[in-house]
Amino acid sequence: MKNNLLIWLILGDLVTLFLLTVVGFASHQELGTAGWRLLTTFLPLCVGWMVSAPFLGLYRPDVYTRSAQIWKSLWGMLLAGPFAALLRGIWLNRPILPVFAIVLTASGMLGMLLWRLLFWLLIARRIRDG
């Protein structure tokens, strides 16, 4: 059961990162013309998250099933956001704008915190208590 739960958690993390990317492009009125350019932000975000989340133990059942551990997702995005901005800058061969890294990180922290809280409210606490 916990393996299925982990799969849903990872898929939710990826959906959250994708929605973050879409909202970012939409906030710049570029969503209609973005197309494959969405990947220039989404993929570095995924890499950053998939490096930081396991490192911080965010995929361990004793972390994602406890409400007191939800805040750790903030640390995950605090590491992943700047790293994603760096990867994106290297990929596009463009300067890494500090304001982009800050906004990406802050919005990612909020998005991931909300997703992880929702996940816990709907699923993980039932497994832990269960």
Image (spheres, helix red, strand yellow):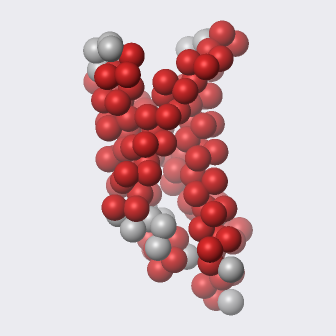
Q: Quadrant of residue 127?
A: bottom right
The relative height of residue 39 versus residue 75 in the rendered view (above or below) is above
Q: Up-down: is 32 above or below 74? A: above
Residue sitting at 34 percent across and 21 percent down?
Answer: 89
Q: Position of residue 125 (x, y in %)?
A: 63, 78
Query: Foreground: 70 or 80?
Result: 80
Dividing the image into 4 quarters, which one contains the N terminus? Answer: bottom right
Asked if one can make out residue 40 in the rendered structure from this viewpoint, the answer is yes
Label count reads: 0
Residue drawn at x 43%, y 48% is 49
Q: Is residue 31 left or right of residue 17?
A: right
- Counting from the top left corner in percent of width and height, residue 81 is at 38, 39
Q: Nearer the viewer, residue 29 or 96?
A: 96
The answer to whether one can see residue 97 in this image is: no
Figure quadrant of the C terminus: bottom right
Picture quarter containing residue 7?
bottom right
> Where 48 falls versus 61 (above or below)?
above
Q: Residue at x 39, y 43 (%)?
A: 48
Write the residue at 49% across / 24% down. Answer: 40
Residue 71 relative to residue 20: left or right: left
Q: Position of residue 16 (x, y in %)?
A: 60, 45
